[in-house]
Amino acid sequence: MVEPVKATGTTISEFRNEPVAVQFYMGLENYELFCNILASLGPSAFELNYLYGNPTLTVEDHLFITLMKLRTYKTNFELSLMFKISESEVYNVFITWIKFMALQWREINIWPEREIVTFYAPSNCTHKGAHNLKEVVVSSLQTQEFHQHICTGKEQSVGLFSCCVQYMGI
């Protein structure tokens, strides 16, 4: 008599050579980019304290579940079927990883130095008295010239506003 083999669920390792599937499920170009995202989270990704006990899958699959849920908006039930885990485990993984990624990536300084912003900013987007980048944006949007554009023509106001907003990354 042949003993039945336990069915295993979906894993990220199945998609190493499947860039189309990686694109579909996570919105990433390929598996290497997935690995880079995991690496960007640092070694603490492998030492997480999950809210409701330790899940059974690998850390890579935890990130895979999280990115898949964000990209495709699959239900916990559907993901539990795909990965052969309980719905509560999907919930546990997703909530823990969302909080973890937010805390980790919050630490990344995405603003360039003030001198670089001042040098490259359009002349109508800068203000010499500002002490930080947010002040540059706020002071630019509060200028009399900006208010005149809002009152006189939508095209001009949209142009100045979008110039400042696009440049400052708001």
Image (spheres, rainbow, N blue to C red):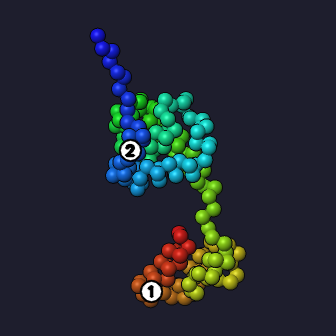
Mark yes or no: residue 135 visible: no
Q: Secondary structure at mark 1?
A: helix
Residue sitting nearer the eye, 105 or 3: 3
* Mark earlier in primary sequence (2, 1): 2
Going 44% across and 80% down the picture, which residue do you hit?
Answer: 158
Percent across and percent down for residue 129 are 70, 81
Give the camera-side residue of 94 and 116: 116
Residue at 67% over, 75% down: 114
Position above or below: 15 against 136: above
- The local crowd at label 2, few if under 14, some if 14 to 19, many if 20 or more residues have their Cα within 10 Å, is some
Crowd band around label 1 with a 10 angstrom C-alpha radius: few (<14), some (14–19), many (20+): some
Amino acid type of the residue tagged 2 in the rendering: Phe
* The N terminus lies in quadrant: top left
Q: Which residue is mark 1?
A: 156
Q: Nearer the viewer, residue 139 or 63?
A: 63
Q: Amino acid at mark 1?
A: Gln
Q: Is residue 14 left or right of residue 99?
A: left
Q: How many marks?
A: 2
**74 sits left or right of 148 in the view:** left
Residue 3 visible in this rendered orientation of the protein: yes
Q: Nearer the viewer, mark 2 or mark 1?
A: 2
Q: CA distance from mark 2 to mark 1?
A: 48 Å
Query: Whole-percent x and y of residue 44?
Result: 62, 42
- 80 shown above or below 163: above
Residue that mark 2 sits on: 15
